Amino acid sequence: MAPPALSLKQRLAALTTNTPASPISPISRSSGFPSPRSSNNGFGLLEMEEQYEGMRAEDREMIDKALNAVITQAGVDYETRPMVVVTAASFPDPRLVSYDILLSRIIAYLDLYVENDYVVVFLAAGGRHTPSWNWVWKAYRSMSRKYRKNLKRLLIVHPTWFSKMFVSLGGAVLSPKFFRKITYVSTLSELARYVPLTQIEIAPAVYNENLKHERNISLPSSVPASLTFGVPLEQLMGPDGESSPVPRVIRDCVEYLRSEGPLGLNLEVEGLFRRSPNVGLLRSVREAYDRGNQVTLAQYYDPHIAAVLIKKFLRDLPEPIFSGALYPVIAKCPPSTGWGVDGLSGPPPSKLPSSGTSSPGLSNGTTNGVNGRGHKRVGSEAEMATVGGWGEGDAVVSTRSP
């Protein structure tokens, strides 16, 4: 007699088996739904936690880094419910990170919020490494009733074929109540109507995907503007600098340029302050600062973005940093000594005080700079004055009479 046909629920449950047999047969596993923490369901959260604790420190660090990129807490929504953001573009290479251990860490992270109502924003587009159906179904089964009950809304932004297909197939298994909590969102402007967009740090791949659907991101009229570019310094910093000693965009850019990148020290990248980055990404980052979004420049892997943002900020200032009255004084300044002004570099070792302490006026000397050395020149004084907006007649140095 032919074996009885399996229901969709049974077939999806069978995906969690870790056996090499490809066909799903009725005898391959029970049709029931054992506890996700039991040892006979192919995935035990406690087992994964034990494996995580037994890993080397550098391997745990890799898992934690992936976790912090994939899932983050982004404040509260308009109804003061915690928002958890999951970014598909940040999923790591499964050859380097165990997705089962990563799932156990994600579940542990969610435990911080599931006791009360919460909202999940899933940024679905831009992922280079897509989790398997097996893993997604295990993730759903690993979540007990409290995870699904207290989830008040699941916003899927830029839904992909994969996410739509899984939700469609899962509709036969998911409870109708849970299914009604899912909302598809086409653009970031639409997302801003559901949750405060400025509280979410958005990955570059998500911005690239959004450019396919809309040119500019618009916020609801009820959200106050938080401009950064083209704003007087007094408005950003306060009359005496009490609000912020340095504008956020300048601080972020300088810190990133002083850090190490994939190609070495970012300040030593060829063509810095001269070459232009991707126009679309540059506009997305600038608009993110203008909206007040959190921005991590290291996600873009392009020091030219930080360099151009500095130039853009200085050129857009309504009042130049150096007035026209100071231009003759600046023009009479002696030639550069080869350190200090050009490229934020520190003095050469021969210029350091014998005590080994650096002068307070040096922004990045040998003792307090990166790797304990000065940086390469990024251009001559004339080139830096031109690209930095410090030439006569430019927006930063006004030649008009005061």
Image (cartoon, grey):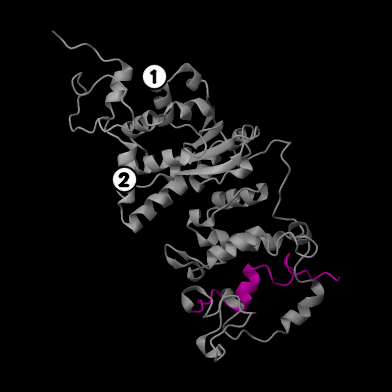
Determine crowd level at label 2: few under 14, some 14-19, many 20+ residues with C-alpha closer than 10 A: few
Instruction: Tell me the quadrant of the picture where the C terminus can be found.
Output: bottom right
Q: Can residue 216 be seen? A: no
Q: Which amino acid type is shown beneath numbered disc 1?
A: Val
Q: Which amino acid type is shown beneath numbered disc 2?
A: Glu
Instruction: Tell me the quadrant of the picture where the N terminus can be found.
Output: top left
Residue 112, percent from left and from top: 50, 40
Instruction: Tell me if residue 376 comes above or below residue 314 in the rendering.
Output: below
Q: Is residue 1 left or right of residue 274?
A: left
Q: Nearer the viewer, mark 2 or mark 1?
A: 2
Pointers 2 and 1 in contact (C-beta within 8 Å):
no
Q: Secondary structure at mark 2?
A: helix
Q: Nearer the viewer, residue 101 or 24?
A: 101
Residue 315, percent from left and from top: 70, 62
Magenta stretch: helix, strand or loop mostly: loop
Instruction: Tell me if residue 135 comes above or below residue 8 in the rendering.
Output: below
Q: Secondary structure at mark 1?
A: loop
Residue 260, percent from left and from top: 46, 66
Determine crowd level at label 1: few under 14, some 14-19, many 20+ residues with C-alpha closer than 10 A: some
Residue 291, percent from left and from top: 66, 46
Disc ID at residue 173: 1
